């Protein structure tokens, strides 16, 4: 049975797809049956350009997804402490929303 457990996030970034680099403005995250990875269930992430509808898809095991969460947080914590005050530390999604 499919769970349809889906989260969506507005993001600001780029991804490399079939045609090269593209803007991505939406991430769709869901835990369900994967298409390619040989698992019963996986954490699937689609990075999407909502204008062109192009996407880059990732399928991860639950353990891999949890490890990735830890490593993303560690990289952000360390990177922001090193680059504190730089314009890179400002989040364009948050700035745009204000």
Image: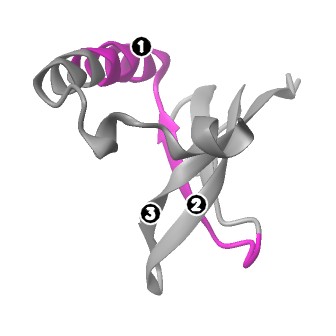
Which residue is painted at 17% across and 18% down in the image?
81
Sequence-first disc among 1 and 3: 3
Quick one: quadrant of the C terminus? top right
Label of residue 66 in the image: 1
Q: Which residue is mark 3?
A: 15
Q: Which residue is mark 2?
A: 24
Which residue is painted at 49% across and 17% down in the image?
62
Q: Position of residue 84 (x, y in %)?
A: 21, 25
**Where is residue 52, by image quadrant?**
bottom right
> What residue occupies the far bottom of the structure in this picture?
19
Which residue is painted at 32% across and 12% down in the image?
70
Sequence-first disc among 3 and 2: 3
Secondary structure category for the residue under label 2: strand
Secondary structure category for the residue under label 3: strand
> What residue occupies the far left of the structure in this picture?
82
Whole-angstrom CA distance, mark 1 to mark 3, is 21 Å
Whole-angstrom CA distance, mark 3 to mark 2, is 6 Å
**Contact, mark 1 vs mark 3 (Cβ under 8 Å):** no
Query: Compared with residue 76, is residue 60 higher up or lower down, i.e. above or below?
Result: below
**Where is residue 86, by image quadrant?**
top left
Q: Is residue 3 visible?
A: yes
């Amino acid at each position: 049975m499919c769970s349809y457990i889906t989260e969506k996030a507005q993001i600001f970034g780029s991804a490399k797809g079939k045609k090269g680099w593209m803007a991505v403005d939406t991430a769709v995250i869901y835990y369900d049956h994967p298409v390619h990875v040989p698992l019963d269930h996986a954490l699937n992430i689609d990075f999407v350009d909502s204008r062109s509808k192009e996407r880059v898809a990732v399928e991860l095991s639950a353990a891999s997804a949890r490890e990735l969460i830890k490593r993303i947080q560690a990289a952000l914590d360390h990177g922001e402490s090193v680059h504190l005050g730089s314009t890179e530390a400002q989040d364009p999604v948050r700035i745009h929303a204000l």
